[in-house]
Image (spheres, grey):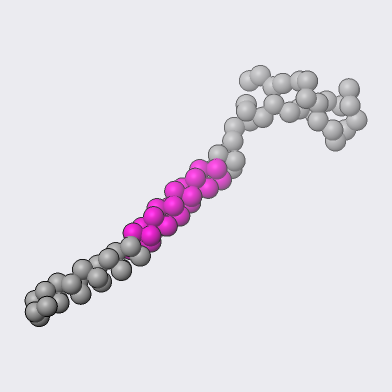
Amino acid sequence: MDKINMINYQQYVLKEKFGKRQEKKTIRNTFKILLSIFLICVFFSLLFSNAESQVLVISSDTLSPGFLNLGEYLYG
């Protein structure tokens, strides 16, 4: 091989070797970003849940205090 072809071959080998690592990093970073967005959405949905979506009520006449009555619902 002459000098020009050897330089092109070295660039090709380096591109193949380090290009795959860069591709794996990109996939890993994309997964981390999507996972963090999902966790942030879950956190805020739990933090700012409205009272109308909570359907459990404590009923002291049917059960002893401290237990939840599943039969009664809140309608706002």
Instruction: From the top left corner, tell me how far across and down residue 38 is, in percent.
Output: 49, 45
Question: Residue visible at 27% across and 66% down?
Answer: 16
The picture quadrant where one finds residue 75 is top right
The answer to whether 38 appears left or right of 25 in the picture is right
Q: Residue furthest front?
A: 1
Question: Residue visible at 59% across and 32% down?
Answer: 50
| Residue nearest the viewer, comparing 19 with 2 | 2
The answer to whether 70 appears left or right of 53 in the picture is right
Question: Residue visible at 33% across and 62% down?
Answer: 20
Judge whether residue 26 is colored magenta: yes
| Residue nearest the viewer, comparing 51 with 46 | 46
Question: Residue visible at 88% across and 33% down?
Answer: 65
How many numbered discs sit on the rendered protein?
A: 0
Quadrant where the image shows the N terminus: bottom left
- Please determine whether, in this image, residue 37 is positioned above or below residue 24: above
| Residue nearest the viewer, comparing 11 with 53 | 11
Instruction: From the top left corner, tell me how far across and down residue 56 is, in percent.
Output: 73, 28
Instruction: From the top left corner, tell me how far across and down residue 49 is, in percent.
Output: 59, 36
Quadrant where the image shows the C terminus: top right
Judge whether residue 5 is colored magenta: no
| Residue nearest the viewer, comparing 18 with 47 | 18
The picture quadrant where one finds residue 67 is top right
Q: Residue furthest right?
A: 64
- Please determine whether, in this image, residue 2 is positioned above or below residue 43: below
Magenta highlight: main SS: helix
Q: Residue furthest bottom?
A: 3
The answer to whether 18 appears left or right of 76 in the picture is left
Region of the chain picked out in magenta, as a range: 22-43
